[in-house]
Amino acid sequence: MIDKVISLEEAAALVPSGATVSIGGFTSQRHPTALLRALVRHGVRDLVVYCHSAGSDVDLLIGAGCVRRVEAAYLADGVFAPIAPNWRRFVEAGRLEFEDYSNAAMMARFSAGAMGLPFFPVRSMLGTDLLEKEGLSAEVRRTDPTAAPKKAAVVNCPFTGESVVLVPAIRTDLCLLHVQRASPQGLVRIEGQEFLDVQQALAADRVIVTCEELVDDEELRREPERNRIPPFAVHAVVPVPFGAHPHSVHNCYDYDPGHLALYAEAARSDDAFRAYLERFVFGPSDHAAYLEAVGGPEHLETLRARSGLGYNPELRRRP
Amino acid sequence: MIDKVISLEEAAALVPSGATVSIGGFTSQRHPTALLRALVRHGVRDLVVYCHSAGSDVDLLIGAGCVRRVEAAYLADGVFAPIAPNWRRFVEAGRLEFEDYSNAAMMARFSAGAMGLPFFPVRSMLGTDLLEKEGLSAEVRRTDPTAAPKKAAVVNCPFTGESVVLVPAIRTDLCLLHVQRASPQGLVRIEGQEFLDVQQALAADRVIVTCEELVDDEELRREPERNRIPPFAVHAVVPVPFGAHPHSVHNCYDYDPGHLALYAEAARSDDAFRAYLERFVFGPSDHAAYLEAVGGPEHLETLRARSGLGYNPELRRRP
Amino acid sequence: MSAPFSTFELMTVAAAREIRDGEVVFAGTGLPMLAAMLAQRTHAPGCVLVFEAGGVDPRMLHLPMSVGDSRTLTGAAMAAGLMEAFTYLLQGGRIDVGFLGGAQVDRYGNINSTAVGNYLQPSVRFSGSGGAADVAALAGRTVIIARHERRRFPERVDYRTSPGWIEGGDSRARAGIRGGGPAAVVTTLGVIRFRPGTKEPYLASAHPGISPEHVQAETGFPLDLSEAGETPPPTREELEILRTTVDPEGVFLKRH
Amino acid sequence: MSAPFSTFELMTVAAAREIRDGEVVFAGTGLPMLAAMLAQRTHAPGCVLVFEAGGVDPRMLHLPMSVGDSRTLTGAAMAAGLMEAFTYLLQGGRIDVGFLGGAQVDRYGNINSTAVGNYLQPSVRFSGSGGAADVAALAGRTVIIARHERRRFPERVDYRTSPGWIEGGDSRARAGIRGGGPAAVVTTLGVIRFRPGTKEPYLASAHPGISPEHVQAETGFPLDLSEAGETPPPTREELEILRTTVDPEGVFLKRH
């Protein structure tokens, strides 16, 4: 039996500077944040990051100076950060290359990559500046092989004559996901919404999955209807309980309001964010130490999901 | 609570002559055959049928003279009919309008219809007669509103320059599915392979679902990850145990080798097929009488699926 | 006599009343989720909620913080993903009404949720479209919720993230957009609607205590005030449900 | 000394040997399923099977009758559907080898599974492409299994359902096809392969007891016989597994 289990540090070492990377999850849910913190510690630089609706996962990488470009539709963290703070600061200061699409367009771009197509059609973005204005310069498009030759193209349907927008496929070197359960052989079980994880995984050359729990392959094969990523597409599996903190994992734990508020405050300035990184990323030597730093087992217990609901109904989102 | 449960006869009455119809399932699996027999009894004519890999479901409608045109990729019934017999006879005799696509192309056409797109791209069919030869005449394309204006179009990707085939969307008046379980409110649970049922359902204006078992809506909502068709897209639900016989339903029963062999033999000539229809379609007054005609409860028990396998391991496929 | 209420409560109620029973609603983060939950608990018990992250037709017990929240799955018919939500449901034409927010809203209901100033190095950068551009293009109709200040209601948005009636008249259809367009803009001051044909905006109602002239003064484009009524206040029942059932924590309806 | 065996058994074994351990295999209805099951039980225990109807990576206990059979799901990693199989797996470039059957196979390994004679009113109408045209275009390489008779091996197929090397040389790439093309044609008489570059067919081996000249006589196009060896017969173990484990019923390997 193939065994794909590796450590968080080994996983981080699979992501070189300059890589194209997509990150699973959605705003404050199921991002592989433990792995991202390990990447920051490893000093990864110049990443080209593709996402759809990101939260303080991508925002952390931006603030830590790991990112050269973001192609995205949305960066925010619920009520705690209606605009992802590092994202906002870096764009306003001209410190980040970026390209804006809608969520449906990013869905379409990842789907094209997953489906082996060079483009995917969408009906939205017509009549908007998402089509009219480009984040990437002609120079970047010409010289950077990771940049699409055009942002999008409007064509007429050969059957109906209607205007349809084609968006270019995304293929990445790596896709980083966090899920509830996975087997050592790379079979993955997502509970709750799938978001765009399946398409992101299949649009990548290598998929690294962190999971709350390692389970037997046979167990996941008992319900093949619930597995959506073929195991042979997954390259590494890393068991990391609370590996999405401060974000939520359906059926496991809720997002951490206190930490998200603290993050949002810290990410408003370079100095405060440097202190945040010291305290929560560089300071703790590993994930266990991080969990201690954010409050330890007692605090984490307050986030536990209630069975049958998938979240913690007692959680107070307002201080 | 909305209740969408109707009888088989009421469901058949929802399908008018001349309608565009898609039929779920795959070769010898999970076709809504009880509903199709009811359509034949109702004297429905001139159907335009869209499928991908059909078996003696569509073949029955063809042989009963209900069909004006078939757009498909494949018609066969496993080892019992490597070529669907009425399909073969009707095409060879010039008695049927048809259009050939590959399965991926039919998948793409239904997906376009489901996704609200006028076309969908595929990379196959290049260099084949599937692109070069058309079943429909220019006259039909001009005068029949159910015919696509073109069979397909080859375009160059605006980003990479590669050749890509665009195929036209399918939208149908009706989609007929058979599934394991459904709620009276129209929530559907498919076990085993999904085939193309979800896309076919969402490419239709009205979806009629026949099911082995009617279950409580709440029960199906306990695992929302396993429901793939939104209940508000389903218009009618008909409980019909053994409603796919002689085909199989994963976890419920296997295909019926004896009946499939008998069917394949009968469908080789008009006369023999007329006798088949008399005996199994027009003769039995309803589905219960059909089940008696094919062997009754004792015979049907020999087809029962074994739990944990989903089929009957004792089934002998060769006489 | 109605009870005292906050502007956000009034807006939520006004937005909820835009939903008709039995409709399929695509709800975005924030007040739209409150409005949809309220509608389900009052005049539209049969409305169906769809969230872009994948939650379809839940019976939510607790207010989600965003559209990806686990709280959007309670009793749900489906836990799907972005592909299903955006293609099969939204682009497939199965959404009756979509709710949108935005930092700027212009004369024809176009929305900016991307950036103010120079796009490449803006004075303010926002979260970005998310699904808003898609909902604006593809839902049967949209309801926009926005804070009403003159700088937020310019003649023309700095960046058109989500298409409204574009430049009025038939410009939206000419742009190739199939979905319905904005039906109403529910603001902190009133409710704006658009004339059939010309798509010129008019003030349908000003909120209690707000004069139509004040609304015009806070609006960067001409607003026809001739038919402006008063926004009906929330009923006691609506307020009760909002405060005790929909958002007892004050996640969005802060009360302090 | 090898045991007596039927032609179909020999073909199945020859086809199975085309699968390398660890490969992802797209198997079609009939002998391909036998070949894949045999390969998993002999030299390629790590090969992964994918079926177009949605079964992915099963550990099958009983021979399926077709690619949609429940028997393709036993112990499977995924029970998906056509969209996943055709887009994410096949078109996504994740299939190493695909197996194809066909009624006619021509000089360059193009296959007809549609119709003989006039397309619109043919003398024989077949099942149609199914997924064959897609597998032929998009798998890393293909193995074709066919009954070898002169009328079934014409210079040019009546209808090109599944693309092989088209007209030889670089014509396949020029047609815009990205996948690999036919590696072998396993027939009732022997195994045909194609020269690199020209894509001209040659007889790699004739089955035991069949002369290369007989193969040529049953072939409607010139076949280079210069390197023709003899197809290695099945081993006792292979036959044992085929007969007692893979197809004990004789679903495809009829024994009567």
Image (tube, coloured by chain):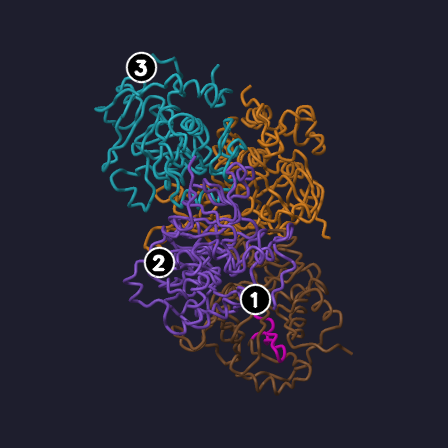
Chain colours: A purple, B orange, C brown, D cyan
In the rendered image, is residue B231 in sight? yes
Say yes or no: labels 1 and 3 on the same chain. Answer: no
Q: Which class describes the residues within 10 Å of circle 1: few (<14), some (14-19), or many (20+)?
A: many
Which amino acid, mark 2? Answer: Pro
Residue B158 tag number:
2
Q: Is residue C188 magenta?
A: yes
What chain letter is assigned to the residue under label 1?
C
Q: Secondary structure beneath disc 1?
A: loop
Residue marked by disc 3: D209
Could you say where residue D231 lies in the image, as x and y percent from the top left? 31, 21
Q: Secondary structure at mark 2?
A: loop
On what subunit does the disc labeled 3 rest? D
> Would you say the residues marked 1 and 2 are in contact, meaning their CB atoms lie under 8 Å apart?
no
Asked whether the viewer can see residue A158, the reply is no
**Residue under pointer 1:** C180
Left or right: D198 in relation to C151: left
Task: Estimate the spatial distance between the alpha carbons at disc 1 and disc 3, rounded to whole Å.
Answer: 73 Å
What residue sits 22% from the left and 24% below the top? Answer: D227
